[in-house]
Image: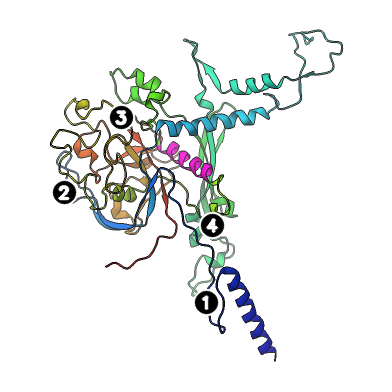
Amino acid sequence: MFATCLLVVTLAAVSCFSSKGGSSATGGEVTGVSGTSMSEPAPYGMVLVKRGSLKMGTENTDSLWGKDVPTRDISVDAFWMDEKEVTNSMYRQFVCWVRDSIIRERLADPAYGGDESYKIEEDKYGEPVTPHLNWNKALPRNPDEDQERAMESVYTYHPVTGEKMLDVKQLNYRYEVFDYVMAAKRKYRLDPNERNLNTDFDNDPNEVVMISKDTAYVDDDGIIHRETITRPLSSMWDFVNTYIVNVYPDTTCWINDFQNAENEVYMRLYFTHSNFNEYPVVGVNWEQANAFCNWRTDFLLKGLGPQAKFVQRYRLPTEAEWEYAARGKDGNELPWQQDGVSSDKGCYYANFKPDRGNYTKDGNLITSRTGIYSANSNGLYDMAGNVAEWTSTVYTEAGVLSMSDMNPTLTYNAAKEDPYALKKKSVRGGSWKDPESFIKSVWRSYEYQNVGRSFVGFRCVRSQVGTASKVKK
């Protein structure tokens, strides 16, 4: 009797649970539990690159440098990718958001106007400057003056010319990232019994597991200090990495990248002037590009409801994803279908350096407005030339040979104390200053993660959720 009652209760529970999920139990058979499906809309300004495979790299030795590019057959899952490079206008929205966030915080700060009264202004002898009937009482604050004081606090003046400008040293963006990958590894499990599944060995409950994490803080002088600390694993919070990044691009890159060149106008106006709104942002280093991806994700999620937990984060593409997307559906080494880099009428397919000392042969001197050249077969613009683009992958000579053949990547968050050589990140696509050999989809190059260049920009990707299965015919 007891067994019978238990069976009835169990079947009733299954039936009830399944009905709630959209399925119903029939005759006690397992029917599964369904949920509300989510049809992910195309993110604004992005195109879907469907999953597939390619032979990454090239077996043709580069004739200019004689370098072998490592090759390997790889497969990647579907992902969304910005159809155009991130522009000055888009990145300025990020900068302005950081600026406005600082102002909002200061509006609640007593030093800028967050309390209800002014202190009596005193002279150097401690006497009130303006006589009042009761000097012990505070004066009412003027909200307009408080707001103006907070807004002006993020600006400064050029010490020589007197020009008013943003105090870019204050524009620091702080964000935290939970490292799902590290937290999933068995050797870092909080429960010692889960670290080793080999039953021939006993797990040591007193084993000390060391974990490294990134942290950062700003000192009293406004200087950002980034540290990688190693300490005994104690909780899930040890997998949270904290970053503080100054987000303003290095506009001086136009001067430092090109010695003895008259590029002052680009240094002063390229990022801020509206004429360059739709040009790719440059002078953004790898760390700033990652900060933009994080801000863009948070900016999106705040406008979504419960479905936000299913939306993947914006990030930089892996080196493999970038090459797969750039080569298009036919796997070409250049994004276009035609042979050569220009049409029969002499129209160029990309913004690069066509000839010695002749940057303008393709119609541009420096960068060009994004999207003015034809897209590749994936619907992506400027995958060759204009600006080279950051990837998330650390640069090694072995390249894809040291990675998996499925969704390959290689990451390393270099600590401040690491040798500088370990801070190389892969850069792809070539730029407006590069010859034809460098704008091929297979060409690999690198820049250091803390350096912004006048010829390096970026675009974002987002993994697609739940790609559809199909039978290949």
* Residue 446 locus on image (x, y percent): 31, 40
Q: CA distance from mark 3 to mark 1?
A: 58 Å
Residue contact at pointers 3 and 1, CB within 8 angstroms? no
| Residue at image point 47% right, 39% down | 291
Residue 102 is drawn in which quadrant? top right
Q: Is residue 289 on the magenta stretch?
A: yes
Residue named by callout 3 = 367
First to last magenta residue range: 286-300
| Marks 1/2: CA–CA distance | 54 Å
CB under 8 Å between callouts 1 and 2? no
Mark 4 and mark 1: Cα distance apart in space: 42 Å
At mark 4, the secondary structure is loop
Judging by the rendered image, the residue that carries numbered circle 1 is 31
Is residue 242 in sight in this rendering? no
Image spot of residue 311 (x, y percent): 49, 52
Label 3 secondary element = loop
Pointer 4 residue: 209
Q: Position of residue 53 (x, y in %)?
A: 29, 58
Say if residue 231 shows up in the picture: yes
From mark 2 to mark 4, how far is it between C-alphas? Answer: 46 Å
Residue toward you, 364 or 393: 364
Tell which circle, 1 or 2, labels the residue nearer the N-terminal end: 1
Secondary structure of the residue carrying tag 1 is: loop
Frontmost residue, 382 versus 435: 382
**Mark 2 secondary-structure assignment:** loop
Q: Dot 2, crowdedness within 10 Å: few (<14), some or many (≥20)?
A: few
Mark closest to the chain's N terminus, 2 or 4: 2
- What is the quadrant of the C terminus in the image? bottom left
Residue for point 36% across, 46% down: 394
Give the residue displayed 51% in from the left and 44% down from the top. Answer: 300
Q: Nearer the viewer, mark 2 or mark 3?
A: 3
Disc 4: CA contacts within 10 A as few (<14), some (14-19) or many (>=20) = some
